[in-house]
């Protein structure tokens, strides 16, 4: 979140408060006893949006790192804890590793997903080599990696605008620490070859899930963060052209085997705004048509965006934020930035087509995920329906506040 508007919001909030490793493919395994509803005929994926476990969240975990920040308005990460507490009340310190997941852990267990994927928008490092061109730098103490393991995350997409906040050394440590924790990675590496390689997740009795991670300049990724043959970096999308689509299709088809499920996790677009860019729509559909992608997992927006089902394949244009320390910053109330969704995508194992898509509303409060209220679930339902109608989809809410996608 390195936009100028964020800095202005943070500065205003502080005034109100009264003060200033890598391998070509990473892999993970989900335990065999976990079964999605419907048994072996379905493969169920949990998809989360941006997960930011640095800064204030890092400070309330059991092993807080160096709190010193290099932001224009905020110089100490503990100030973000103060902001959150001013709005929502005291946060216990230290919290255990499962704390940040809150009520989401029950929902994750209930869904029994085969694979859990998030976009990790935080470097995991003690490096002090911060990017001087950027105003916001996210990092988590490597000793706090167990907070990701507590959510039983299988794969972190890393092609985003914060993974290199702390330089090449910070990226290398991030990759190594996640590898040690048994968490697969995609979208960043010591060279372009590793950065473009998928995470390969073996699902016992059900085959493989391949996760490719991409990031674009319109999400705030500097062009010189692109990995090269002799330089670490991210799997950077130079544009959304047909030429880029063909290049990616060749790469995916070269890696894909019969029966594989392919996820394209893409960090793209602005932080705020429901409008989906036409080039994003064309690109996402092109990945389905040319590359055989089964799920497009979009993120970067701080709020959920519209959903499309194209030729039986779900396209999530923006999954919104899942975990962060933004409480108390203020502004952008029209987007309800405290709300998020857990996405559970169930695919037919034989064809990879969508069988069902369920979503669970959550609210970020005191740095943990609470189940969304009836009013919050209603707001998310109405918002998703407005934004998804042009794509021919809508959501319905059940008595417990969970959402399900329907075709119009």
Image (tube, rainbow, N blue to C red):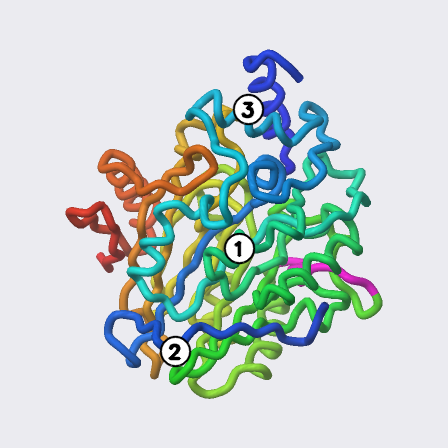
Can see residue 126?
Answer: yes
Q: Which residues are magenta?
A: 231-239
Image height check: is 175 above or below 373? below
How far is disc 1 from disc 3 in space, using C-alphas? 23 Å
Secondary element at tag 2: loop
The x and y percentages for residue 136 are 68, 36
Q: Which residue is mark 3?
A: 82
How far is disc 1 from disc 2 in space, using C-alphas? 20 Å
Whichever of labels 1 and 3 marks the residue nearer the N terminus, that label is: 3
Q: Nearer the viewer, residue 123 or 332?
A: 123
* In this rendering, position of residue 68 left or right of residue 330: right
How far is disc 2 from disc 3 in space, using C-alphas? 42 Å
The x and y percentages for residue 159 are 63, 57
The x and y percentages for residue 339 are 39, 38
Image height check: is 192 above or below 147? below
The quadrant in which the N terminus is found is top right
The label number, if any, that marks residue 148 in the structure image: 1
- Image point (53%, 72%), residue name: 28
* In this rendering, position of residue 314 left or right of residue 79: left
- Image point (29%, 36%), residue name: 376
- Image point (43%, 24%), residue name: 89
Q: Residues within 10 Å of mark 3 (few under 14, many from 20)?
A: some
The label number, if any, that marks residue 32 in the structure image: 2
Whichever of labels 2 and 3 marks the residue nearer the N terminus, that label is: 2
* In this rendering, position of residue 195 left or right of residue 407: right
Image height check: is 377 above or below 344? above
């Amino acid at each position: 979140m390195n936009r100028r508007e964020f800095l202005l919001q943070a500065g205003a909030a502080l005034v109100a408060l009264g003060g200033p490793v890598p391998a070509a493919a990473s892999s993970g395994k989900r335990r065999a006893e976990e079964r999605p509803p419907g048994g072996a005929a379905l493969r169920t994926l949990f998809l989360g949006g941006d997960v930011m476990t640095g800064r204030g969240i890092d400070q309330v975990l059991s092993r807080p790192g160096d709190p010193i920040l290099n932001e224009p308005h905020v110089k100490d990460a503990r100030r973000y804890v103060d902001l959150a507490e001013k709005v929502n009340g005291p946060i216990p310190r230290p919290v255990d590793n499962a704390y940040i997941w809150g009520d989401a852990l029950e929902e994750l267990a209930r869904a029994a997903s085969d694979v859990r994927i998030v976009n990790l928008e935080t470097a995991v490092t003690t490096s002090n080599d911060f990017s001087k061109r950027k105003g916001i730098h996210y990092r988590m103490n490597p000793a706090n990696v167990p907070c990701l393991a507590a959510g039983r995350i299988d794969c972190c997409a890393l092609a985003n605008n914060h993974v290199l906040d702390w330089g090449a050394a910070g990226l290398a440590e991030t990759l190594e620490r996640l590898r040690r924790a048994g968490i697969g990675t995609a979208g960043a590496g010591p060279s372009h070859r590793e950065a473009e390689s998928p995470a390969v997740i073996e699902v016992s009795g059900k085959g493989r899930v391949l996760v490719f991670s991409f990031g674009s300049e319109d999400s705030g990724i500097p062009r010189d963060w692109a990995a090269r043959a002799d330089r670490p970096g991210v799997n950077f999308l130079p544009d959304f052209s047909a030429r880029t689509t063909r290049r990616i299709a060749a790469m995916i088809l070269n890696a894909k085997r019969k029966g594989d499920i392919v996820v394209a996790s893409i960090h793209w677009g602005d932080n705020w705004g429901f409008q989906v860019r036409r080039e994003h729509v064309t690109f996402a559909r092109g990945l389905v048509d040319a590359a055989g992608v089964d799920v497009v997992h979009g993120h970067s927006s701080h709020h959920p965006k519209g959903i499309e089902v194209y030729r039986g394949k779900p396209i999530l244009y923006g999954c919104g934020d899942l975990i962060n320390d933004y409480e108390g910053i203020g502004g952008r109330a029209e987007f309800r930035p405290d709300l998020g969704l857990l996405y559970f995508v169930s695919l037919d194992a034989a064809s990879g087509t969508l069988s069902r898509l369920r979503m669970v509303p959550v609210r970020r409060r005191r740095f943990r995920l609470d189940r969304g209220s009836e009013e919050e679930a209603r707001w998310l339902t109405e918002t998703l329906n407005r934004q998804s109608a042009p794509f021919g989809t809508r959501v319905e809410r059940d008595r417990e506040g969970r959402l399900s996608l329907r075709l119009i």
